[in-house]
Image: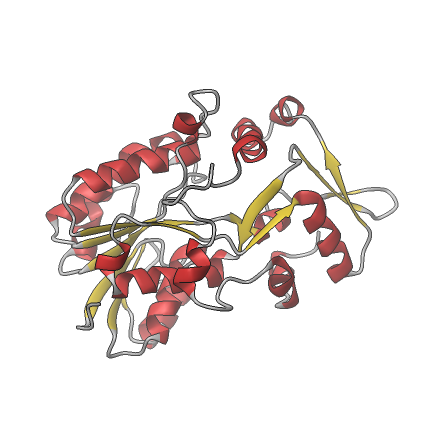
Amino acid sequence: MTTSKKTVAVLGALGAQGSSVVSSLLEEGPEAFTVRAVTRSVDSDAAKALIAKGVQVVSGDTKKPESLSDAFKGADAAYIVLNFWDPAIMMKEEALTKEVLDVAKASGVKHILYASLADSEKVSGGKLKVPHFTMKAKALEYARSLGFEAVTSIEAAMYYSNFFTFMKPQKDDDGTLVWTLPSKGKISVYDPNTGTGPATVAAIKDPAKYNGKEILLEADLLTCEEMVAMFGEKMGVPTKFQYVEPKVFAGFGFPGAEELAEMFEWFDEYGYYGPETEQRKHSSGKEASGAGKLLTCQEWLDTDAYKTFGEL
């Protein structure tokens, strides 16, 4: 294990996953890491709060990979995440990520920690593409071809918060909150704000151990129906889960509906992370993170974090 102080560049440092990585790095103490937060919003209150904690805040935009040269320069490790759901990224995610990786390599970064996911297209034999999964997997393959000293895949599960944001329920006339989704099976879920950082930092501290590894950040494994029941019990309101066929859901017409419908088909047929193998163990995230670091759904609800998303 390497113990000398490292400089770590964190992309998306003000987002859910990136902010968790920054927080976990800071928890190691000022002698452990030089933390470099990369964001477009260098003048925001959130960025200023990080500066006050001793974090280097550097301007950079994943949609303009060439803008990341300064962010990567002198960094030993880099946490790389791109937001597929940004309308300016979406189907450009794979190409943009590869360009980001090229800049990181040219800048001398040694260890890449990349927010990847399963290759749903390959696993399903082309039946399901789920671009925001498959493009990440293809970018991971590219990262491994570039000759970095270490490449670690840090794979988020579905966010608990998704059920309170873009998958929020509709309210029936009687006040019941109804979640309508094309999902029957169990889904790997977690809280990105607390659950991304611990395993990532473990990998940064020991690149030899985690080189080539795929860390699956599954905190809980539940059906949508089970989670909806838990939401209702916690909030003290009537809730209901309503299943709808993927083809019907895809026709709902909102941006990303088709992508989400195919994603839930992937979950039901292959599981969130795809078939479990020696390389892709569901327990890998808990093992890397340490006891109690990945919050179960009930533990997350008990933090009242769901309240930050407003009234449903």
- Percent x, y for residue 274? 47, 37
Residue depicted at 46% across the width and 54% down the height:
283
Q: Is residue 186 left or right of residue 106?
A: right
- Percent x, y for residue 186? 61, 42
The quarter holding residue 94 reads top left
- Percent x, y for residue 84? 41, 39
Scheme of image coloration: secondary structure
Residue depicted at 75% across the width and 36% down the height:
242
Q: Is residue 245 visible?
A: yes
Q: Who is closer to the viewer here, 123 or 52?
A: 123
Residue depicted at 29% across the width and 45% down the height:
62
Instruction: Relative to 32, say whether 156 is above or below.
Output: above
Residue depicted at 63% across the width and 22% down the height:
247
Q: Is residue 197 visible?
A: no
Instruction: Relative to 200, say whether 69 is above or below.
Output: above
Q: Is residue 222 left or right of residue 211?
A: right
- Percent x, y for residue 30? 27, 78
For the image, the number of numbered tags is 0
Q: Who is closer to the viewer here, 69 or 265?
A: 265
